Image (cartoon, grey):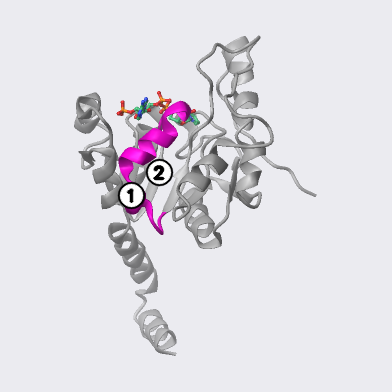
């Protein structure tokens, strides 16, 4: 009821749109993002969050890796350890090498992840070269990396996202129509939070269900990379068509 009255008063004063945009800026300033990683994914997503007014900290074992980025696209971001970034965050983004995901989360600290949404952009790419353009994974089709991480950190709310596209398209993808980001995870509220971020970053979202669905989403990275390794084509994204 109170909201309705505020709405009416603001509409009457012609200020509703301004109220809405101030409100969304306010929400973003409230939401602190901690990205675990210093690579190309961490920097691309980090720049996207900064542009939209989020409060950001990147976590790394070696802050010197981010010195140049902080002078450009990352200006305004904070840098800390994995633990500091996770503790700072309301929402965490995991953007480290797949083989190191578990140890990066150990360094972040289970307590710092408790109850938080963790956007999992990682892929379980093995330390082995692609075979005829096809990446090798260290997981198998009946158990994904995200399930392993969810089992190891049960109090965190993992949501797979951003894993099936190159980092250069993660924010404001420049296609004629909106590409699809496939997500999954066990916690509905966490997925709703990630969907809102994806909306903001220029994606349509397809929720594929619980953590087990990462078994199907993670291999999309293999498919996405094949034209890249075979023909040096890296300018595509997936879209789910429906009738
Ligand atoms: N590159 C892409 O376009 C792309 C697209 C979609 C998904 N992904 C996935 O996103 C993730 C990040 O990819 P990326 O290309 O940005 O970076 P990356 O080179 O795969 O990973 C770099 C990050 O991994 C961390 N790391 C490496 N070894 C570690 C260890 N032993 N312990 C803790 N942390 C360790 C590094 O930490 P420090 O900062 O401490 O060195 C660094 O932050 C990967 O899982 C990748 O498969 C990548």
Left or right of 158 on screen, residue 13: left
Within-10-Å neighbours for mark 1: few <14, some 14–19, many 20+: many
Depth check: give the residue in front, 220 or 149. 149
Check disc 1 and report its element: helix, strand or loop: strand
Is 102 a magenta residue?
A: yes
Check the picture and name the quadrant holding the N terminus: bottom left
Residue 72 appears in the rendering = yes
Q: Which residue is drawn at 63% across and 31% down?
A: 220
Depth check: give the residue in front, 227 or 149. 149
Q: Where is residue 232 in the image (x, y as percent from the top left)?
A: 57, 12
Check disc 2 and report its element: helix, strand or loop: strand
Q: Mark 2 points at which residue?
A: 93
Is 41 a magenta residue?
A: no
Determine the main secondary structure of the stretch shown in magenta: helix
Task: Please tell me the numbered disc located at residue 210.
Answer: none
Q: Name the residue under label 1.
A: 33
Depth check: give the residue in front, 198 or 101. 101
Residue 51 appears in the rendering = no
Mark closer to the chain start, 2 or 1: 1
Q: Which residue is drawn at 38% across and 34% down?
A: 103
Segment colored magenta = 96-116
Within-10-Å neighbours for mark 2: few <14, some 14–19, many 20+: many
Q: Is residue 192 above or below residue 158?
A: below
Image marks 2 and 1: residues in contact by CB distance under 8 Å: yes
Q: Where is residue 233 in the image (x, y as percent from the top left)?
A: 58, 17
Image quadrant where residue 82 sits: top left
Q: Position of residue 18 (x, y in %)?
A: 34, 68
Left or right of 148 on screen, residue 13: left
Left or right of 174 on screen, residue 206: right
């Amino acid at each position: 009821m109170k909201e309705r009255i505020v709405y009416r008063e603001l509409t009457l004063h012609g200020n509703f749109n301004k109220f809405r945009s101030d409100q969304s800026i306010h929400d973003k300033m409230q939401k602190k993002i901690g990205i675990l990683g210093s690579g190309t994914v961490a920097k691309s997503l980090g720049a996207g969050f900064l542009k939209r007014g989020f409060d950001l900290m990147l976590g790394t074992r070696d802050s010197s890796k981010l010195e140049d980025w902080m002078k450009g696209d990352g200006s305004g971001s904070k840098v800390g350890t994995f633990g500091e970034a996770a503790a700072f965050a309301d929402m965490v983004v995991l953007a480290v090498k797949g083989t190191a995901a578990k140890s990066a989360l150990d360094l972040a600290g289970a307590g710092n992840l408790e109850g938080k949404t963790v956007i999992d952009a990682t892929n379980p790419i093995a330390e082995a070269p692609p075979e005829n353009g096809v990446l090798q994974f260290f997981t198998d089709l009946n158990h994904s990396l995200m399930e392993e991480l969810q089992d190891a950190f049960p109090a965190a709310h993992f949501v797979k996202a951003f894993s099936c596209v190159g980092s250069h398209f993660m924010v404001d993808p420049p296609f004629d129509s909106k590409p699809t980001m496939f997500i999954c995870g066990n916690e509905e509220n966490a997925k709703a939070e990630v969907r809102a971020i994806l909306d903001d970053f220029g994606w349509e979202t397809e929720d594929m269900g619980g953590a087990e669905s990462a078994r199907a989403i993670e291999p999309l990275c293999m498919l996405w990379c094949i034209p890249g390794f075979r023909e040096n084509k890296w300018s595509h994204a997936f879209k789910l068509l429906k009738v």
